[in-house]
Amino acid sequence: MRRRLLAVALALVPVLTVSACGDGASRAPFAETRTPPSLGSRFYPPQGWSWGYVRSGEGLIQRYGVSAPPVAPRATILILTGYGESAEAWFETASALNAQGFTVWVLERQGQGGSERATPWRDLGHADSFDPDVAAVRALTNGVVRPRMDIPFVVLGHSEGGLVALRAAEQGLSMDGLILSSPAFGLTAAPRSREDFARFAPAMRTLRLGWIRTLDQSGWRRDGPDGVQSGATHDPQRGKVQAAWMLANPDLRMGGRSLGWFAAFFDASEAAARDIRKADGPTLMLDAGRDQAVTATPQRRLCAAMVDCKETRYPGAGHDLHLESDAIRDPWLAAIVDFIRARIEAKALRRKG
């Protein structure tokens, strides 16, 4: 039976490659990073930015950061990053939201950014399940953020972070609003179909082969594409931000995903679709019209199925709306601010009532 399971798992891809050429870097989390000298000051950490760690149960330790506005906060925002992103990619946006009077928290995903790694290969994107990500959101919210009752608490999830944010909402995380920016419910590229993963994932997990990375998922490369070259943004400066942080800080570097990661993604996206009516709070979905990372059909379908969801699509935008050119990013940011202001007004009215 064990041989049969092995044969089934190996049939998932024609060729498998183990990332054994990695440097065996520590799995440990880390906080402070070196600011790349190539970046302008607008990409520096927000004023008063500080780091911390959160862990839920036996899950991996995950890094988060926080910055407060210069005035009494009018709202609290929790940002959940996309695949391969570190919180540093959100510094410019966090500063802009601070300037609006909002406290900003950024939680990195399990196994990326400054978070603890699941394998000795630090640049390997691996997860057996997205459930620990959702658990970490709950742990950070309830144990660290502790949202105030008098101001709104809004969760903003980008890409796969949007999937995690939606699952948290579906599982009852208390929030006043949900923002999904280029949410990942379907991927434009995967080593095999969703159906193949459904067939082979049990054997792969039984044999603990989920950490294997296929040939189409390379490790981090110094000469890898930046945001403009990959089609994620059209802004030459913002397109270099994440690559610059990774170059200056080797522990931030991320390459391709493991087989286990893809299986976990498909499990989470199917669960999100199944439980979509449980996310019954106000939701704003902001999508990219030229997204080369995720597919549009499930975005439209899930927003239409939600109790209260409004969708806006930016026709010329790449996947990373927060790193796009001003012509796209400015309206995207304005939509977020307007949504949060509406939550502020709604909360004030409820208090008066």
Image: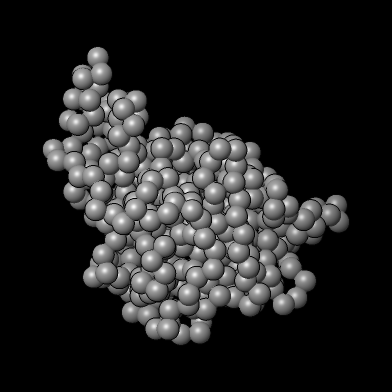
Q: Is residue 42 above or below residue 168?
A: below
Residue 265 visible from this viewpoint: no
Q: Quadrant of residue 31 in the image?
A: bottom right
Q: Is residue 57 above or below residue 250?
A: above
Q: Is residue 190 above or below residue 333?
A: above
Q: Residue furthest right?
A: 352
Q: Nearer the viewer, residue 111 or 194?
A: 111
Q: Residue furthest top?
A: 1
Give x and y (percent) for residue 84. Answer: 39, 58
Residue 253 visible from this viewpoint: yes
Give x and y (percent) for residue 72. Answer: 77, 71
How many numbered discs?
0
Residue drawn at (20%, 45%) of the image: 17
Q: Quadrant of residue 321 in the image?
A: bottom left
User: Which quarter of the rendering shows the N terminus?
Assistant: top left
Give x and y (percent) for residue 78. Answer: 60, 58
Residue drawn at (27%, 41%) of the image: 212
Q: Is residue 218 above or below residue 169?
A: below
**Is 7 situated left or right of 127 in this image?**
left
Q: Nearer the viewer, residue 301 or 63?
A: 63
**Is 232 situated left or right of 285 in this image?**
left
Residue drawn at (24%, 22%) of the image: 5
Residue drawn at (58%, 59%) of the image: 64
Q: Nearer the viewer, residue 290 or 24?
A: 24
Colour scheme: one colour
Give x and y (percent) for residue 27. Answer: 44, 51
**Is 107 situated left or right of 2 in this image?**
right
